[in-house]
Amino acid sequence: MATAELLRKVRRLEIRSRRLVEDLFSGNSESVFKGRGVEFEEVRPYVPGDEVRDIDWNVTARLGAPYVKRFVEERELTVMLVVDISRSMHFGTSAVAKRELAAELCAVLGFAAMRNNDRVGLVLAGGDVEHFVRPARGRTHLLRMLRDLLNTEPETPGTRLGHAARFLTRTLRRRGLVFWISDFEDTLDPRDWRVLSRRHELTALALRDPRDEQLPRAGWVTFEDLESGERRLVDTHSEAVRRAYQQRARERRRAADAALAKAQCPVVEIRTDRPYFPALMRHFGSRHMRKGVA
């Protein structure tokens, strides 16, 4: 992509995303990521009414009197954005392709984190981990991430998201918030995701297009597999063909959702033919309720 065109796209993303982030925070001075967890601060003497599970038995044994651990809400959060850039993400039959929608979601989440002075990082994944940007703060850092996202194409064919899940497990030392943006057109091993979700708060943003499951009646059409490049002539007038296409697509979706559910990873469906903002608002609202945040 030419430099001038790339910069224009980044600028448009920034303008639109900043406006949406202001809407996300409208009437609420707190971060949408508030309530993200606690971290250990100190030990202090036990007093009646303290939670027994918070007793530090090593300190208690050493000092001969009960001591409990004191926790405070984390002051610093790492937000990691993981984006599937495999070739299937170029698919889109509505207003926007999945890859373009993923970039806008990254911009919104990134500027929301920046507003709260949180660190943001980026992983671009396809057949392997294609690109990694370490978490940092600031507008310049975020705009660089968006440029990388818009301008990086996968070098490894196929989709193997488990490679990226294992990479994140090894790389992210401090507990953080991981947003995984993908169409999840891959066979997921629940074990990879279970380990990751135990160490971090993991959310899947599943990008879906109406034509993922439904073929239009358009006669004989040449279809191309975006991952393999294979082409096939298909009779879309055939009800049996359309039904089989829909069944296979639904089976893939259910398998991906089931694998993520086993890892206790919430799935937020983001569609190319509908505004994504309400889905994000519902997710953050339910997340705050689960964490007891008003």
Image: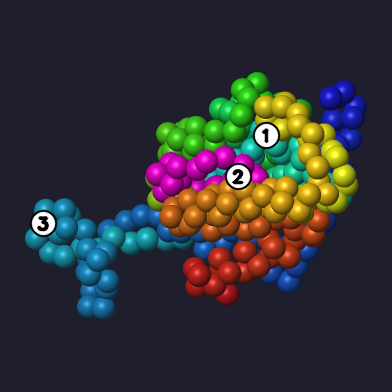
Q: Which residue is mark 1?
A: 85
Circle 2/circle 1 CB separation < 8 Å: no
Q: Is residue 180 magenta?
A: yes
Colour option used: rainbow
Mark 1 closeness class: few <14, some 14–19, many ≥20 residues within 10 Å: many
- The mark that comes first in sequence, 1 or 3, is 3
Count the numbered circles shown: 3
Q: Nearer the viewer, residue 231 or 265?
A: 231
Considering depth in this image, is 184 or 204 the residue closer to the camera?
Answer: 184
Residue 189 image position (x, y, % from top left): 45, 42
Q: Which residue is mark 2?
A: 184
Q: Is residue 59 above or below residue 283?
A: above
Query: Label 3: which residue?
Result: 61
Nearest to viewer (mark 1 / mark 3): 1
71 displayed left or right of 75? left
Residue 122 pos. (x, y %): 62, 37
